[in-house]
Amino acid sequence: MLSRDDATALVAGSRLFDERWYAGLCGESFDSRREAAAAWVRDPGDHSPHPLFEPRWLYPGGAWRRHAPDPLSYYLSQVTLGDRPPRSPHPRYAHDLGPLEDWLTDHDPHELLPAPLPRAVDEAATEVRVPTDDLRRAVRWLRHLHRSAPEARVVALTDRTDVRRILDAVALDQPRVVVGDWSMPWGTPVVSIDPDLEPPRWRWLAPLLAALDRPGVAAAQPLLLDESFLVTAPVLRGHPVSALEALDGAVLPQRFAGIEARLPHTDGSSVLVTSSWVVGSGAGAGAGSSSGEGWAILEERARRVEVIEGTPSLHWAIDIAAGAAPIGRRWGDWHFAASLATALRRLGQWVEIDHPETRGRATRAETDVVLTLRGLERVAPAHGATNLLWVISHPEDVTAAELAGFDHAFAASTTWAARHGATPLLQCTDATRFRPGTGVTDAGAGVLFVGNARGGMRPVVAAAREAGVGVTVIGTGWAEHGVAAVADRIANEDLPTAYASAGVVLNDHHADMAAEGFVSNRVFDVLAVGGRLLTDPVAGLADVLAEVGASSQPTWQGPDDLARLARPPYDPWPDEHERRAVAARVVAAHSFDARAATLLDAARALLASSGDGSRG
Protein backbone atom coordinates (compact mmCIF):
# COMPACT_ATOMS: atom_id res chain seq x y z
CA MET A 1 0.00 0.00 0.00
CA LEU A 2 1.24 3.49 -0.83
CA SER A 3 2.54 5.48 2.11
CA ARG A 4 1.10 8.91 2.81
CA ASP A 5 4.37 10.58 1.80
CA ASP A 6 4.52 8.79 -1.55
CA ALA A 7 0.83 9.45 -2.15
CA THR A 8 1.28 13.15 -1.35
CA ALA A 9 4.19 13.41 -3.80
CA LEU A 10 2.15 11.79 -6.57
CA VAL A 11 -0.84 14.05 -5.96
CA ALA A 12 1.17 17.28 -5.65
CA GLY A 13 2.96 16.54 -8.92
CA SER A 14 -0.19 15.76 -10.90
CA ARG A 15 -2.23 18.12 -13.04
CA LEU A 16 -5.27 16.17 -11.82
CA PHE A 17 -4.97 17.91 -8.49
CA ASP A 18 -6.41 21.44 -8.58
CA GLU A 19 -5.63 22.92 -5.19
CA ARG A 20 -7.94 25.89 -5.70
CA TRP A 21 -10.82 23.60 -6.61
CA TYR A 22 -10.13 21.35 -3.63
CA ALA A 23 -9.75 24.28 -1.24
CA GLY A 24 -13.10 25.64 -2.36
CA LEU A 25 -14.82 22.29 -1.89
CA CYS A 26 -13.54 21.70 1.62
CA GLY A 27 -13.85 25.33 2.70
CA GLU A 28 -10.20 25.72 3.75
CA SER A 29 -7.12 27.67 2.67
CA PHE A 30 -3.61 26.28 2.28
CA ASP A 31 -0.18 27.91 2.26
CA SER A 32 1.21 25.67 -0.47
CA ARG A 33 0.22 23.13 -3.07
CA ARG A 34 1.94 20.36 -1.10
CA GLU A 35 0.02 21.29 2.05
CA ALA A 36 -3.25 21.03 0.10
CA ALA A 37 -2.18 17.69 -1.39
CA ALA A 38 -1.28 16.38 2.07
CA ALA A 39 -4.71 17.41 3.37
CA TRP A 40 -6.41 15.59 0.49
CA VAL A 41 -4.38 12.43 1.05
CA ARG A 42 -5.02 12.53 4.78
CA ASP A 43 -8.81 12.80 4.42
CA PRO A 44 -10.30 12.76 0.90
CA GLY A 45 -13.81 12.51 2.35
CA ASP A 46 -16.47 12.76 -0.34
CA HIS A 47 -14.70 15.55 -2.26
CA SER A 48 -13.00 15.42 -5.64
CA PRO A 49 -9.46 16.77 -6.28
CA HIS A 50 -10.22 18.12 -9.75
CA PRO A 51 -13.35 18.91 -11.76
CA LEU A 52 -12.52 16.02 -14.11
CA PHE A 53 -11.84 13.45 -11.38
CA GLU A 54 -14.84 11.90 -9.61
CA PRO A 55 -13.74 9.15 -7.17
CA ARG A 56 -17.20 7.72 -6.64
CA TRP A 57 -17.66 7.36 -10.39
CA LEU A 58 -14.24 5.81 -10.98
CA TYR A 59 -14.25 3.47 -7.97
CA PRO A 60 -17.90 2.97 -6.93
CA GLY A 61 -16.92 0.09 -4.62
CA GLY A 62 -14.05 2.01 -3.01
CA ALA A 63 -11.41 -0.44 -4.28
CA TRP A 64 -8.65 2.17 -3.84
CA ARG A 65 -8.83 1.79 -0.04
CA ARG A 66 -6.90 -1.49 -0.20
CA HIS A 67 -3.99 0.07 -2.09
CA ALA A 68 -3.60 3.76 -1.24
CA PRO A 69 -4.70 6.38 1.30
CA ASP A 70 -6.69 8.28 -1.35
CA PRO A 71 -8.27 7.53 -4.74
CA LEU A 72 -6.17 9.95 -6.80
CA SER A 73 -2.79 8.55 -5.75
CA TYR A 74 -4.12 5.06 -6.49
CA TYR A 75 -5.23 6.19 -9.96
CA LEU A 76 -1.88 7.86 -10.61
CA SER A 77 0.05 4.80 -9.45
CA GLN A 78 -1.98 2.66 -11.87
CA VAL A 79 -1.16 5.02 -14.75
CA THR A 80 2.54 5.00 -13.77
CA LEU A 81 2.60 1.22 -13.89
CA GLY A 82 0.93 1.24 -17.30
CA ASP A 83 -2.32 -0.22 -15.99
CA ARG A 84 -5.46 1.07 -17.68
CA PRO A 85 -7.96 2.36 -15.10
CA PRO A 86 -11.34 0.64 -15.14
CA ARG A 87 -13.09 3.66 -16.62
CA SER A 88 -12.53 7.33 -17.29
CA PRO A 89 -12.18 9.44 -14.16
CA HIS A 90 -15.31 11.45 -14.94
CA PRO A 91 -18.65 10.30 -16.35
CA ARG A 92 -18.55 13.03 -19.01
CA TYR A 93 -14.95 12.50 -20.16
CA ALA A 94 -14.54 10.00 -23.01
CA HIS A 95 -12.14 7.21 -22.08
CA ASP A 96 -10.79 6.90 -25.62
CA LEU A 97 -9.34 10.44 -25.57
CA GLY A 98 -6.36 9.03 -23.70
CA PRO A 99 -4.89 9.84 -20.29
CA LEU A 100 -6.10 13.11 -18.86
CA GLU A 101 -2.54 13.96 -17.83
CA ASP A 102 -1.57 14.22 -21.52
CA TRP A 103 -4.50 16.49 -22.36
CA LEU A 104 -3.82 18.75 -19.41
CA THR A 105 -0.29 19.49 -20.70
CA ASP A 106 -1.61 21.78 -23.42
CA HIS A 107 -5.01 22.82 -22.12
CA ASP A 108 -6.49 24.72 -19.24
CA PRO A 109 -8.16 21.99 -17.15
CA HIS A 110 -11.49 23.75 -17.13
CA GLU A 111 -11.55 24.04 -20.92
CA LEU A 112 -11.67 20.26 -21.01
CA LEU A 113 -14.88 20.07 -19.08
CA PRO A 114 -17.50 18.60 -21.38
CA ALA A 115 -20.63 20.49 -22.18
CA PRO A 116 -23.24 19.93 -19.49
CA LEU A 117 -26.28 17.83 -20.19
CA PRO A 118 -29.23 19.95 -21.36
CA ARG A 119 -31.09 21.42 -18.42
CA ALA A 120 -34.38 19.53 -17.93
CA VAL A 121 -36.25 22.02 -15.81
CA ASP A 122 -39.34 23.04 -17.75
CA GLU A 123 -41.59 20.46 -16.14
CA ALA A 124 -40.07 20.56 -12.66
CA ALA A 125 -42.78 20.42 -10.04
CA THR A 126 -40.72 22.11 -7.33
CA GLU A 127 -37.88 24.59 -7.03
CA VAL A 128 -35.32 23.94 -4.29
CA ARG A 129 -33.04 26.92 -3.59
CA VAL A 130 -29.63 25.88 -2.30
CA PRO A 131 -27.54 28.50 -0.45
CA THR A 132 -24.00 28.97 -1.78
CA ASP A 133 -22.41 30.89 1.09
CA ASP A 134 -20.47 27.75 2.03
CA LEU A 135 -19.23 26.07 -1.15
CA ARG A 136 -18.55 22.71 0.49
CA ARG A 137 -22.07 22.61 1.89
CA ALA A 138 -23.58 23.74 -1.42
CA VAL A 139 -21.90 20.84 -3.25
CA ARG A 140 -23.16 18.40 -0.64
CA TRP A 141 -26.72 19.74 -1.09
CA LEU A 142 -26.53 19.45 -4.89
CA ARG A 143 -25.40 15.84 -4.69
CA HIS A 144 -27.96 15.01 -2.00
CA LEU A 145 -30.86 16.50 -3.94
CA HIS A 146 -29.73 14.80 -7.14
CA ARG A 147 -30.15 11.46 -5.34
CA SER A 148 -33.17 12.18 -3.17
CA ALA A 149 -35.28 14.62 -5.21
CA PRO A 150 -34.83 13.72 -8.90
CA GLU A 151 -37.98 15.55 -10.00
CA ALA A 152 -37.17 18.90 -8.38
CA ARG A 153 -35.36 21.76 -10.03
CA VAL A 154 -32.41 22.80 -7.88
CA VAL A 155 -31.28 26.42 -8.11
CA ALA A 156 -27.92 27.56 -6.73
CA LEU A 157 -27.72 31.35 -6.76
CA THR A 158 -24.26 32.92 -6.86
CA ASP A 159 -22.51 35.92 -8.43
CA ARG A 160 -18.99 34.61 -7.71
CA THR A 161 -17.17 33.31 -10.80
CA ASP A 162 -15.02 30.79 -8.91
CA VAL A 163 -18.02 29.38 -7.06
CA ARG A 164 -20.06 29.17 -10.23
CA ARG A 165 -17.24 27.35 -12.05
CA ILE A 166 -17.17 24.65 -9.38
CA LEU A 167 -20.93 24.29 -9.12
CA ASP A 168 -21.27 24.13 -12.92
CA ALA A 169 -18.80 21.25 -13.00
CA VAL A 170 -20.53 19.42 -10.17
CA ALA A 171 -23.85 19.80 -11.99
CA LEU A 172 -22.64 18.51 -15.36
CA ASP A 173 -24.62 15.30 -15.04
CA GLN A 174 -27.44 16.78 -13.01
CA PRO A 175 -29.74 18.23 -15.68
CA ARG A 176 -32.22 19.60 -13.14
CA VAL A 177 -29.60 21.77 -11.44
CA VAL A 178 -29.41 25.41 -12.49
CA VAL A 179 -26.52 27.57 -11.31
CA GLY A 180 -27.82 31.11 -11.41
CA ASP A 181 -31.26 32.70 -11.25
CA TRP A 182 -34.27 31.16 -12.97
CA SER A 183 -37.93 32.06 -13.05
CA MET A 184 -40.40 29.36 -12.10
CA PRO A 185 -43.98 29.15 -13.37
CA TRP A 186 -46.59 30.90 -11.25
CA GLY A 187 -47.65 28.90 -8.20
CA THR A 188 -44.74 26.42 -8.23
CA PRO A 189 -43.68 25.40 -4.71
CA VAL A 190 -40.37 26.92 -3.63
CA VAL A 191 -38.22 25.24 -0.98
CA SER A 192 -35.73 27.49 0.82
CA ILE A 193 -32.80 26.04 2.78
CA ASP A 194 -31.05 28.06 5.47
CA PRO A 195 -27.27 28.42 4.93
CA ASP A 196 -26.16 26.61 8.08
CA LEU A 197 -27.92 23.30 7.37
CA GLU A 198 -26.20 20.11 6.22
CA PRO A 199 -28.19 17.71 4.01
CA PRO A 200 -29.68 14.78 5.97
CA ARG A 201 -28.96 11.13 5.19
CA TRP A 202 -32.56 10.37 4.25
CA ARG A 203 -35.37 11.66 2.07
CA TRP A 204 -37.35 14.53 3.56
CA LEU A 205 -38.84 16.54 0.68
CA ALA A 206 -41.87 14.43 -0.32
CA PRO A 207 -43.82 14.67 2.98
CA LEU A 208 -43.04 18.38 3.16
CA LEU A 209 -44.51 19.03 -0.28
CA ALA A 210 -47.48 16.75 0.44
CA ALA A 211 -48.46 19.11 3.26
CA LEU A 212 -48.91 21.92 0.71
CA ASP A 213 -51.80 19.95 -0.81
CA ARG A 214 -53.82 20.30 2.39
CA PRO A 215 -56.60 22.92 2.30
CA GLY A 216 -55.58 26.32 3.65
CA VAL A 217 -51.85 25.52 3.79
CA ALA A 218 -49.42 27.91 2.08
CA ALA A 219 -46.14 26.85 3.73
CA ALA A 220 -44.67 23.90 5.62
CA GLN A 221 -41.58 23.28 7.73
CA PRO A 222 -39.94 20.00 8.76
CA LEU A 223 -38.80 19.02 12.23
CA LEU A 224 -35.32 20.10 13.24
CA LEU A 225 -33.28 17.43 15.03
CA ASP A 226 -29.78 17.23 16.44
CA GLU A 227 -27.27 14.50 15.58
CA SER A 228 -28.80 12.28 18.28
CA PHE A 229 -32.25 12.65 16.70
CA LEU A 230 -33.61 14.80 19.52
CA VAL A 231 -35.83 17.77 18.70
CA THR A 232 -34.10 21.16 18.53
CA ALA A 233 -37.04 23.21 17.24
CA PRO A 234 -39.68 24.39 17.49
CA VAL A 235 -41.15 22.78 20.67
CA LEU A 236 -40.27 20.04 23.15
CA ARG A 237 -36.55 20.57 22.66
CA GLY A 238 -34.50 17.59 23.73
CA HIS A 239 -37.35 15.09 23.30
CA PRO A 240 -37.51 12.26 20.73
CA VAL A 241 -39.51 12.65 17.53
CA SER A 242 -42.42 10.57 18.84
CA ALA A 243 -43.24 13.31 21.35
CA LEU A 244 -44.30 15.67 18.55
CA GLU A 245 -46.39 13.35 16.40
CA ALA A 246 -49.56 14.94 17.72
CA LEU A 247 -48.38 18.21 16.16
CA ASP A 248 -48.30 17.00 12.57
CA GLY A 249 -50.07 19.69 10.56
CA ALA A 250 -50.20 22.12 13.48
CA VAL A 251 -50.24 25.80 12.49
CA LEU A 252 -46.95 27.53 13.37
CA PRO A 253 -47.00 30.93 15.04
CA GLN A 254 -43.98 32.02 12.96
CA ARG A 255 -41.15 30.68 10.81
CA PHE A 256 -38.21 29.06 12.57
CA ALA A 257 -34.71 28.32 11.26
CA GLY A 258 -34.26 25.41 8.91
CA ILE A 259 -36.20 24.68 5.72
CA GLU A 260 -39.47 26.04 4.41
CA ALA A 261 -41.60 24.91 1.49
CA ARG A 262 -43.95 27.64 0.28
CA LEU A 263 -46.52 28.25 -2.40
CA PRO A 264 -45.64 31.77 -3.65
CA HIS A 265 -48.44 34.30 -3.95
CA THR A 266 -50.73 32.07 -1.88
CA ASP A 267 -52.44 32.99 1.38
CA GLY A 268 -52.77 30.40 4.11
CA SER A 269 -51.21 28.87 7.17
CA SER A 270 -47.68 27.63 7.75
CA VAL A 271 -47.71 24.16 9.30
CA LEU A 272 -45.30 21.75 10.96
CA VAL A 273 -44.63 18.41 9.22
CA THR A 274 -43.37 15.88 11.76
CA SER A 275 -42.76 13.15 9.16
CA SER A 276 -40.07 15.29 7.49
CA TRP A 277 -36.80 15.65 9.39
CA VAL A 278 -33.63 17.69 8.90
CA VAL A 279 -30.64 18.19 11.17
CA GLY A 280 -30.11 21.68 12.56
CA SER A 281 -29.75 23.72 15.71
CA GLY A 282 -32.85 25.84 15.36
CA ALA A 283 -30.75 29.01 15.37
CA GLY A 284 -29.22 30.94 12.52
CA ALA A 285 -30.25 32.78 9.41
CA GLY A 286 -33.96 33.05 8.97
CA ALA A 287 -34.67 31.96 12.51
CA GLY A 288 -37.71 33.15 14.25
CA SER A 289 -37.90 33.10 18.02
CA SER A 290 -39.35 29.86 19.35
CA SER A 291 -40.60 31.54 22.51
CA GLY A 292 -43.87 33.26 23.17
CA GLU A 293 -47.52 32.41 23.63
CA GLY A 294 -47.93 30.65 20.29
CA TRP A 295 -45.13 28.19 20.95
CA ALA A 296 -46.37 27.60 24.51
CA ILE A 297 -49.78 26.66 23.13
CA LEU A 298 -48.17 24.20 20.74
CA GLU A 299 -46.15 22.62 23.55
CA GLU A 300 -49.29 22.28 25.66
CA ARG A 301 -51.06 20.65 22.74
CA ALA A 302 -48.19 18.17 22.26
CA ARG A 303 -48.34 17.16 25.93
CA ARG A 304 -52.13 16.95 26.11
CA VAL A 305 -53.60 13.55 26.95
CA GLU A 306 -57.11 12.26 27.38
CA VAL A 307 -58.12 12.46 31.01
CA ILE A 308 -59.67 9.23 32.27
CA GLU A 309 -61.35 9.43 35.63
CA GLY A 310 -59.60 7.30 38.23
CA THR A 311 -56.52 6.74 36.06
CA PRO A 312 -53.39 8.83 36.58
CA SER A 313 -51.72 10.21 33.47
CA LEU A 314 -48.16 8.95 33.68
CA HIS A 315 -45.21 9.93 31.52
CA TRP A 316 -43.81 6.84 29.75
CA ALA A 317 -40.70 6.16 27.70
CA ILE A 318 -40.67 2.98 25.62
CA ASP A 319 -37.05 2.01 24.95
CA ILE A 320 -36.40 -0.06 21.81
CA ALA A 321 -33.39 -1.47 19.98
CA ALA A 322 -34.29 -0.01 16.55
CA GLY A 323 -32.27 3.02 15.50
CA ALA A 324 -33.68 6.52 15.53
CA ALA A 325 -32.98 7.27 11.85
CA PRO A 326 -35.89 6.76 9.43
CA ILE A 327 -34.58 3.34 8.42
CA GLY A 328 -35.18 2.22 12.01
CA ARG A 329 -38.89 2.59 11.36
CA ARG A 330 -38.73 -0.46 9.13
CA TRP A 331 -37.89 -2.62 12.14
CA GLY A 332 -40.58 -4.74 13.74
CA ASP A 333 -39.54 -3.30 17.12
CA TRP A 334 -40.56 0.17 15.97
CA HIS A 335 -44.01 -0.89 14.78
CA PHE A 336 -44.52 -2.89 17.97
CA ALA A 337 -43.58 0.11 20.13
CA ALA A 338 -45.68 2.53 18.06
CA SER A 339 -48.81 0.36 18.43
CA LEU A 340 -48.19 -0.06 22.15
CA ALA A 341 -47.64 3.69 22.60
CA THR A 342 -50.94 4.42 20.85
CA ALA A 343 -52.75 1.92 23.08
CA LEU A 344 -51.26 3.52 26.20
CA ARG A 345 -52.32 6.95 24.96
CA ARG A 346 -55.87 5.64 24.68
CA LEU A 347 -55.57 4.96 28.42
CA GLY A 348 -54.66 8.58 29.11
CA GLN A 349 -50.88 8.18 29.16
CA TRP A 350 -48.21 10.42 27.62
CA VAL A 351 -45.74 8.22 25.76
CA GLU A 352 -42.43 8.75 23.99
CA ILE A 353 -40.35 6.18 22.11
CA ASP A 354 -36.60 6.11 22.74
CA HIS A 355 -33.83 4.55 20.68
CA PRO A 356 -30.18 3.73 21.40
CA GLU A 357 -29.27 7.25 20.27
CA THR A 358 -31.86 9.01 22.46
CA ARG A 359 -32.06 6.94 25.64
CA GLY A 360 -29.41 9.12 27.33
CA ARG A 361 -31.38 12.37 26.84
CA ALA A 362 -31.65 14.75 29.79
CA THR A 363 -35.44 15.07 29.36
CA ARG A 364 -35.86 11.47 30.52
CA ALA A 365 -35.70 12.88 34.04
CA GLU A 366 -39.38 13.87 33.53
CA THR A 367 -40.38 10.24 32.96
CA ASP A 368 -42.44 8.22 35.43
CA VAL A 369 -42.17 4.82 33.75
CA VAL A 370 -39.49 3.44 31.43
CA LEU A 371 -40.56 0.30 29.60
CA THR A 372 -37.66 -1.50 27.91
CA LEU A 373 -38.60 -3.81 25.04
CA ARG A 374 -35.65 -6.17 25.25
CA GLY A 375 -34.01 -6.52 21.86
CA LEU A 376 -30.45 -7.14 20.76
CA GLU A 377 -28.70 -5.53 23.70
CA ARG A 378 -29.03 -5.07 27.42
CA VAL A 379 -30.34 -1.68 28.53
CA ALA A 380 -29.58 -0.32 31.99
CA PRO A 381 -32.62 0.68 34.08
CA ALA A 382 -33.24 4.43 34.22
CA HIS A 383 -32.46 6.23 37.46
CA GLY A 384 -35.43 7.82 39.23
CA ALA A 385 -38.17 6.08 37.21
CA THR A 386 -40.22 2.92 37.58
CA ASN A 387 -38.51 0.42 35.29
CA LEU A 388 -40.41 -2.31 33.47
CA LEU A 389 -38.77 -4.92 31.24
CA TRP A 390 -40.60 -6.83 28.55
CA VAL A 391 -38.54 -9.61 26.99
CA ILE A 392 -39.99 -10.09 23.51
CA SER A 393 -36.97 -11.59 21.73
CA HIS A 394 -33.44 -12.97 22.17
CA PRO A 395 -34.17 -14.65 25.51
CA GLU A 396 -30.82 -16.46 25.38
CA ASP A 397 -29.08 -13.15 26.09
CA VAL A 398 -31.12 -12.24 29.18
CA THR A 399 -29.54 -13.08 32.54
CA ALA A 400 -31.00 -13.36 36.02
CA ALA A 401 -28.99 -10.29 37.03
CA GLU A 402 -30.57 -8.27 34.22
CA LEU A 403 -34.08 -9.29 35.27
CA ALA A 404 -33.34 -8.43 38.89
CA GLY A 405 -32.37 -4.88 37.97
CA PHE A 406 -35.92 -3.97 36.93
CA ASP A 407 -38.89 -3.24 39.14
CA HIS A 408 -40.97 -5.76 37.20
CA ALA A 409 -40.11 -8.11 34.34
CA PHE A 410 -42.50 -9.52 31.73
CA ALA A 411 -41.74 -12.11 29.07
CA ALA A 412 -43.55 -13.00 25.86
CA SER A 413 -43.48 -16.70 26.76
CA THR A 414 -45.38 -18.56 29.46
CA THR A 415 -42.74 -21.30 29.70
CA TRP A 416 -39.70 -19.00 29.81
CA ALA A 417 -41.40 -16.64 32.26
CA ALA A 418 -42.18 -19.51 34.63
CA ARG A 419 -38.54 -20.62 34.70
CA HIS A 420 -37.15 -17.13 35.23
CA GLY A 421 -39.58 -15.59 37.68
CA ALA A 422 -41.09 -13.16 35.18
CA THR A 423 -44.74 -12.43 34.45
CA PRO A 424 -46.05 -13.93 31.18
CA LEU A 425 -47.09 -11.25 28.70
CA LEU A 426 -47.32 -12.58 25.17
CA GLN A 427 -46.85 -10.61 21.99
CA CYS A 428 -50.08 -9.34 20.45
CA THR A 429 -51.81 -7.66 17.53
CA ASP A 430 -52.89 -4.13 16.73
CA ALA A 431 -56.67 -4.53 16.75
CA THR A 432 -57.18 -1.13 15.13
CA ARG A 433 -55.88 -2.73 11.91
CA PHE A 434 -55.83 -6.51 12.37
CA ARG A 435 -59.43 -7.46 13.09
CA PRO A 436 -62.24 -9.68 11.81
CA GLY A 437 -63.83 -8.61 8.55
CA THR A 438 -60.65 -7.15 7.07
CA GLY A 439 -61.08 -9.26 3.96
CA VAL A 440 -62.37 -12.57 2.64
CA THR A 441 -59.97 -15.46 2.24
CA ASP A 442 -60.18 -17.09 -1.18
CA ALA A 443 -59.97 -20.88 -0.98
CA GLY A 444 -58.03 -20.81 -4.24
CA ALA A 445 -55.63 -18.01 -3.32
CA GLY A 446 -51.88 -18.57 -3.13
CA VAL A 447 -49.40 -18.97 -0.30
CA LEU A 448 -47.81 -15.86 1.23
CA PHE A 449 -44.67 -15.29 3.29
CA VAL A 450 -43.70 -11.85 4.60
CA GLY A 451 -40.23 -11.61 6.10
CA ASN A 452 -36.56 -10.94 5.37
CA ALA A 453 -34.07 -13.69 4.63
CA ARG A 454 -32.05 -12.76 7.77
CA GLY A 455 -28.79 -13.70 6.09
CA GLY A 456 -29.88 -17.23 5.14
CA MET A 457 -32.73 -19.28 3.77
CA ARG A 458 -35.71 -19.15 6.12
CA PRO A 459 -36.80 -22.67 7.19
CA VAL A 460 -40.40 -22.34 6.04
CA VAL A 461 -39.44 -21.02 2.60
CA ALA A 462 -36.85 -23.78 2.22
CA ALA A 463 -39.44 -26.40 3.19
CA ALA A 464 -41.96 -24.97 0.73
CA ARG A 465 -39.43 -25.07 -2.11
CA GLU A 466 -38.52 -28.66 -1.31
CA ALA A 467 -42.23 -29.53 -1.28
CA GLY A 468 -42.76 -27.83 -4.64
CA VAL A 469 -45.15 -25.28 -3.16
CA GLY A 470 -45.20 -21.87 -4.86
CA VAL A 471 -44.85 -18.99 -2.39
CA THR A 472 -45.28 -15.25 -2.86
CA VAL A 473 -42.38 -13.80 -0.85
CA ILE A 474 -42.14 -10.21 0.34
CA GLY A 475 -38.91 -9.13 2.03
CA THR A 476 -35.21 -8.35 1.54
CA GLY A 477 -32.12 -10.49 1.07
CA TRP A 478 -33.76 -13.26 -0.96
CA ALA A 479 -32.09 -12.93 -4.37
CA GLU A 480 -28.80 -14.45 -3.20
CA HIS A 481 -30.73 -17.56 -2.16
CA GLY A 482 -32.43 -17.95 -5.52
CA VAL A 483 -35.80 -16.65 -4.32
CA ALA A 484 -37.53 -13.95 -6.39
CA ALA A 485 -39.34 -11.73 -3.89
CA VAL A 486 -42.18 -9.71 -5.37
CA ALA A 487 -41.26 -6.69 -3.22
CA ASP A 488 -38.73 -5.67 -0.57
CA ARG A 489 -41.42 -4.65 1.87
CA ILE A 490 -45.12 -4.08 2.33
CA ALA A 491 -46.60 -1.10 4.13
CA ASN A 492 -47.78 -1.98 7.59
CA GLU A 493 -51.26 -0.67 6.82
CA ASP A 494 -51.52 -3.10 3.88
CA LEU A 495 -50.57 -6.20 5.86
CA PRO A 496 -54.06 -7.00 7.24
CA THR A 497 -55.61 -7.24 3.79
CA ALA A 498 -52.64 -9.24 2.49
CA TYR A 499 -52.97 -11.76 5.33
CA ALA A 500 -56.75 -11.96 5.06
CA SER A 501 -56.81 -12.49 1.29
CA ALA A 502 -54.00 -15.07 1.11
CA GLY A 503 -54.81 -18.76 0.80
CA VAL A 504 -52.31 -19.57 3.57
CA VAL A 505 -49.83 -17.32 5.42
CA LEU A 506 -46.56 -19.08 6.29
CA ASN A 507 -44.60 -18.35 9.45
CA ASP A 508 -41.51 -19.60 11.24
CA HIS A 509 -39.56 -18.73 14.39
CA HIS A 510 -35.90 -18.58 15.34
CA ALA A 511 -35.06 -22.00 16.77
CA ASP A 512 -34.37 -20.55 20.23
CA MET A 513 -37.59 -18.51 20.19
CA ALA A 514 -39.63 -21.59 19.31
CA ALA A 515 -37.91 -23.71 21.95
CA GLU A 516 -38.39 -21.04 24.60
CA GLY A 517 -42.06 -20.45 23.74
CA PHE A 518 -41.84 -16.92 22.29
CA VAL A 519 -44.84 -16.83 19.94
CA SER A 520 -44.31 -14.20 17.23
CA ASN A 521 -46.73 -11.35 16.73
CA ARG A 522 -47.41 -12.60 13.18
CA VAL A 523 -49.32 -15.53 14.72
CA PHE A 524 -51.72 -13.10 16.39
CA ASP A 525 -51.88 -10.79 13.35
CA VAL A 526 -52.94 -13.55 10.96
CA LEU A 527 -55.43 -15.10 13.38
CA ALA A 528 -56.90 -11.66 14.14
CA VAL A 529 -57.96 -11.13 10.50
CA GLY A 530 -59.36 -14.64 10.17
CA GLY A 531 -56.54 -15.79 7.92
CA ARG A 532 -55.20 -19.29 7.52
CA LEU A 533 -51.97 -19.47 9.50
CA LEU A 534 -49.37 -22.18 8.98
CA THR A 535 -46.60 -21.81 11.56
CA ASP A 536 -44.01 -24.08 13.09
CA PRO A 537 -44.54 -25.63 16.54
CA VAL A 538 -43.68 -23.36 19.46
CA ALA A 539 -43.55 -24.32 23.11
CA GLY A 540 -46.83 -23.24 24.70
CA LEU A 541 -48.51 -22.42 21.36
CA ALA A 542 -51.11 -25.16 21.81
CA ASP A 543 -52.30 -23.51 25.03
CA VAL A 544 -52.57 -20.12 23.31
CA LEU A 545 -54.57 -21.63 20.44
CA ALA A 546 -56.85 -23.55 22.82
CA GLU A 547 -57.55 -20.34 24.74
CA VAL A 548 -58.94 -18.67 21.58
CA GLY A 549 -60.73 -21.77 20.32
CA ALA A 550 -58.26 -22.62 17.57
CA SER A 551 -57.14 -26.06 18.75
CA SER A 552 -57.56 -27.42 15.21
CA GLN A 553 -55.01 -24.94 13.86
CA PRO A 554 -52.42 -27.01 11.87
CA THR A 555 -48.66 -26.53 12.18
CA TRP A 556 -45.77 -27.63 9.97
CA GLN A 557 -42.55 -29.44 10.83
CA GLY A 558 -41.10 -30.27 7.41
CA PRO A 559 -41.61 -30.33 3.62
CA ASP A 560 -44.14 -33.17 3.83
CA ASP A 561 -46.42 -30.96 5.94
CA LEU A 562 -46.09 -28.09 3.47
CA ALA A 563 -46.88 -30.41 0.55
CA ARG A 564 -50.01 -31.63 2.32
CA LEU A 565 -51.24 -28.38 3.87
CA ALA A 566 -50.17 -25.47 1.65
CA ARG A 567 -52.29 -26.29 -1.39
CA PRO A 568 -55.92 -25.44 -2.22
CA PRO A 569 -58.57 -26.05 -1.09
CA TYR A 570 -56.91 -25.88 2.37
CA ASP A 571 -59.32 -28.35 3.96
CA PRO A 572 -57.38 -28.77 7.26
CA TRP A 573 -58.48 -25.27 8.34
CA PRO A 574 -61.89 -24.49 9.81
CA ASP A 575 -64.36 -22.56 7.67
CA GLU A 576 -64.44 -18.80 7.50
CA HIS A 577 -67.23 -18.44 10.08
CA GLU A 578 -65.20 -20.32 12.69
CA ARG A 579 -62.01 -18.44 11.82
CA ARG A 580 -63.83 -15.14 12.35
CA ALA A 581 -64.97 -16.34 15.76
CA VAL A 582 -61.35 -17.15 16.61
CA ALA A 583 -60.33 -13.71 15.31
CA ALA A 584 -62.80 -12.00 17.65
CA ARG A 585 -61.35 -13.87 20.64
CA VAL A 586 -57.78 -13.03 19.61
CA VAL A 587 -58.65 -9.34 19.38
CA ALA A 588 -60.29 -9.42 22.82
CA ALA A 589 -57.46 -11.25 24.61
CA HIS A 590 -54.30 -10.47 22.66
CA SER A 591 -54.50 -6.84 21.50
CA PHE A 592 -52.10 -4.02 22.30
CA ASP A 593 -54.94 -2.47 24.30
CA ALA A 594 -55.05 -5.54 26.54
CA ARG A 595 -51.26 -5.47 26.98
CA ALA A 596 -51.27 -1.73 27.68
CA ALA A 597 -53.85 -2.22 30.44
CA THR A 598 -51.68 -4.91 32.05
CA LEU A 599 -48.57 -2.72 31.91
CA LEU A 600 -50.42 0.29 33.30
CA ASP A 601 -51.79 -1.75 36.20
CA ALA A 602 -48.27 -2.95 37.02
CA ALA A 603 -46.83 0.57 36.86
CA ARG A 604 -49.59 1.97 39.09
CA ALA A 605 -49.09 -0.77 41.66
CA LEU A 606 -45.33 -0.15 41.77
CA LEU A 607 -45.74 3.60 42.05
CA ALA A 608 -48.34 3.19 44.81
CA SER A 609 -46.08 0.83 46.77
CA SER A 610 -43.21 3.31 46.51
CA GLY A 611 -45.38 6.21 47.67
CA ASP A 612 -45.40 7.87 44.24
CA GLY A 613 -48.87 6.81 43.16
CA SER A 614 -49.91 10.37 42.44
CA ARG A 615 -47.07 11.08 40.01
CA GLY A 616 -47.97 12.32 36.56
Image: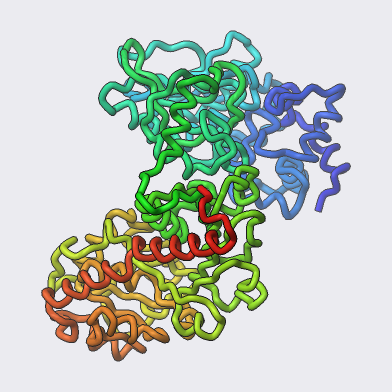
The answer to which quarter of the image holds residue 48 is top right
**Residue drawn where x is 21% and y is 75% of the image:** 582
432 left or right, relative to 303: left
Q: Residue furthest bottom?
A: 560
The answer to which quarter of the image holds residue 94 is top right
Q: Position of residue 69 (x, y in %)?
A: 77, 46
The answer to which quarter of the image holds residue 5 is top right
**Residue drawn where x is 19% and y is 73% of the image:** 503
Q: Position of residue 193 (x, y in %)?
A: 52, 22
89 left or right, relative to 156: right
539 or 184, which lies in front?
Answer: 539
Residue 465 appears in the picture as rendered: no
468 to 179, vertically: above or below:
below
Tally the numbered discs. 0
Q: Position of residue 253 (x, y in %)?
A: 44, 20
396 or 448, which lies in front?
Answer: 396
**Residue drawn where x is 22% and y is 71% of the image:** 583
Residue 176 appears in the picture as rendered: yes
Q: Position of residue 20 (x, y in %)?
A: 74, 21
**Residue drawn where x is 74% and y is 30% of the image:** 17
257 left or right, relative to 437: right
Q: Residue furthest top?
A: 159
344 to 601, vertically: above or below:
above
